[in-house]
Image (cartoon, coloured by chain):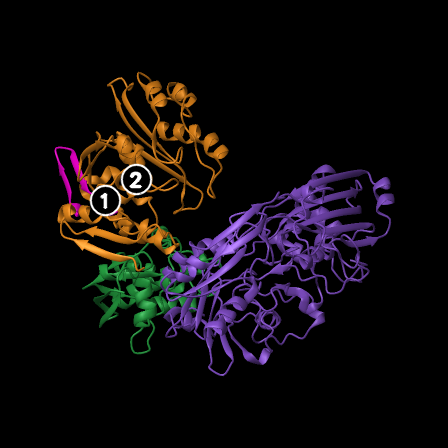
Amino acid sequence: MTLALQTFATVKDAGAALKAAGACYLGGGTLVVRAANEGDVSISGFVRSTEPALSAVAVSDNEVRIGASVTMAAIARHPDLAPLAHAARVVGGPAIRNMATVGGNLFAPTPYGDFTVALLALDATVSTGDGELPIETFLAKRESNDAIVTAVGFTLPKEGGFRFLKVSRVKPKGVSVLSIATVLEQAPDGTVSSARVAFGCMADRPIRARAAEKALIGRKLTADGIAPALAVARDGISPPTDPIASAWYRNEVLPVHLGRLLLA
Amino acid sequence: MELRKSYFADQRKDDLHEIGQPRPRSDSPGHVTGKTTYFADRNFPGMLHLKMVRSPHHHARIRSIDTSEAEKHPGVVKVLTAKDVPHNVYTILILIQIGPEDETVLADGKVRWKGEAAVAVLAETERAAQEAAAKVKVDYEVLPAVFDMDEALKPGAPIVNEYHGRNYYLYDSGECRKVRFGDVEAGFAGADHVLEQTYQSSPIEHAPTETTGCIVAPEGNDRFTCYTNTQAMFFTLDNTSIILQMPGNKLHFVGGTVGGGFGGKVDVIVEPIAILGAKLTGRPVCFIYSREEEMQISSPRAAEKVVIKDGVMNDGRIVARKVTGYTDAGAYSRHSPYGAQKGAGHYPGPYTIPNVWIDTYCVYTNRTPSSAMRGFGVTIGDFALEVQMDKLARLIGMDPLEFRFINAYRDGDMKAHRQPTEGAALIECMQEASRAANWPVAEKFMAMSSYAKGA
Amino acid sequence: MAKVPVQFTLNGAEKAEFIDSGTTLLHALRDKIGDTSPKGGCHQGTCGACSVIIDGELRLSCLTLAEACNGATITTTSGLSEGGVLHPLQRAFLDAFATQCGFCTPGMIMAAKVLLDHTPNPSREDVVEALSGNICRCTGYEPIIQAVLTAARSNSQNAA
């Protein structure tokens, strides 16, 4: 009847407790406590782990590993994660950023989960008690995930290689109309040699924009150069209609914002 | 702050000592120290929490309600259904003879909008109440629903509310509130241009930061104290007295401190059922809307549709105005018959027009009942009227502000409701607006006056 | 119902309570300890009315479990004035007419205090960002922003 909290020193023990029906992993609380407060009776208790590795950030040779309990605020102020600071800072208001975790963001339903859009463009790896998974694979079946997420890992992009845009109607803080993250590499002549593009709010979870990525290869970041990518940007999207925006509106403005981000 | 005392200087004594001076607000020290006591800042030993089981359907017949599992749930103290409410069918404005009673405190046989209250669960904790509410079984037969005012007014549309028997409110003036002044058809016939436009709005939620709610404490002498954030204390007390068939002296209402209302807390929804719960259990009861309930269940501003047809001369005079207004009350009246009536009073706008025809309808649909919100019946109408004014000015190639000076009502002008205008200050307001907005108008307009007709 | 002990410092005073496991800090503060200055506006992390300061960081007490605050130092708006003297932020909110219904005010003051603790001379942009998680539905944002800027100025004058 009460939503008891169980705290464990290790992820392993927490993982075992999580097998109980209705048990829910507690990260920053911004998703699961919120759900319980609204009367989600499927949640019967909270489980958390205080294992120090969950709160650690490690960066060496551009390889980054961020513990699942690291907050958006901690990412935004970490000197080695400066390229990602913007993407962390657009999540919620200051209080939410002090609470919301990287691990939790992976589970945030549309229109939330902006930081996961960044991680998807970075082609991150998600570590769980059961092993490591490419983020795209993880996101596709996140509802059935029953292992505790322990960390995300990725390679820091080259200077200027990472771009991020969150579009919201309320400034400076608002829920996403959409968000876009790109990781681009360019040859010395300026043509794009590799591209990863991720969208938020274009499906029920963040998605990769494969057609746009393909259309950017060998092109310069000019209005003409990106035109083919913008033309196929909507391939495979199914944006939702919610109180923030209609599916129609999101569909209409996606290429506009993608264009602005690529030309920035 | 600057006071322009030159306006109407000859109409009053210049002895204002308070107006124009900053004075501390009496409630602010409590606000900044966190000491202001809102209704929910109270806690009573043994307080029960009330959660509502709500209709998942827009329109349905209730075949049966089974509360047996919910009653057995640990922590549950009482489960209330329609039969427990002494006078279950009510309407707020019955206090001023605006009937019929058309709304149920707890659904009886039928639900008419998605979210309508059907069963109230009282339990030791909020969580237990939520869990038990999920165990209440209501067997619904879903009925055809209507969500659009035009559809609702068509012959053969599903009847939303049997207490009215038709999908519009029947005023003593008939199917709508009416204003008739001059000969509007002759006005259109003589006009240089006629412009008819339709304006529509969607419901708007007040979204106060403090959600609607109340806490009720039995005083032990058959009297109940209700701490509430209602904006309508005596409406609530009197309606509660009717619904619970209890004399008013058994009801002690404490309120006045409201964490944002904007008109959204005038509907007498939470208090009667919470007091009934306290009466039947002998325990204090807390009924507070969740944020989701505040957004989905509390009344919004009505959706409106406004059709405006104007006849205008090339010299800028509006010679005829016909307005048909529709207010979407949702499934129940609440304050909407009054809102629609206010529209009829307001639609000519602050303009002197010799020929006016107004019809305003209060329409029932299977949407969330709408009610009061800041200037309801007027705000959407003003939006429509002023957009129409801009369109008319553009149509005849006139500056939109000068166009308004030409038509502005002034003292002594006869309004469409046959009340002579008194105390108008529109001309002067527009003169100040012209200066403040750096939107110059011809000197003759700056020399006009609301009450010196020669000017 | 299993009760669990919680112990923390609230506005300089030691507090210890037995609470139901899973109780939010907002609930514990308001209904157990009796500090009703944090308000429950949405219980969803959206409105900011429940904002408190935990170990120097702005947090939402509606989404924080009380048990997770064991050993913490917590500040709420009710603890800001000392000996009947208003905190400069409270004074500025009062003088600038930065309250209307007052429901958002304690949370606003918490968000503003954390800002000024870390950034004594904020820009207007800093203030807007710092208050971005706090909703004022009376829409009195402009006087609130001015109050925070005024409080910052009076702080720096006092320090000088």
Instruction: Reply yes or no: does residue C100 show up in magenta.
Output: no
Q: Colour of chain B?
A: purple
**In this figure, which residue is indicated by the disc labeled 1?**
A75
Q: Secondary structure at mark 1?
A: helix
Residues marked 2 and 1 touching at CB (< 8 Å) = yes
Tell me residue C75's x, y (percent).
Answer: 27, 66
Q: Which residue is disc 2 drawn over?
A: A115
For this rendering, which residue is in front, A36 or A56? A36
Residue at 59 percent across and 78 percent down: it is B248
The C terminus of chain B, quarter of image: bottom right
Q: CA distance from mark 2 to mark 1?
A: 10 Å
Instruction: Tell me: residue B291, above or below residue A147.
Output: below
Q: Which residues are magenta?
A: A54-71
Question: What colour has chain A?
Answer: orange
Sequence-first tag of 2 and 1? 1
In the image: residue B308, left or right of residue C50: right
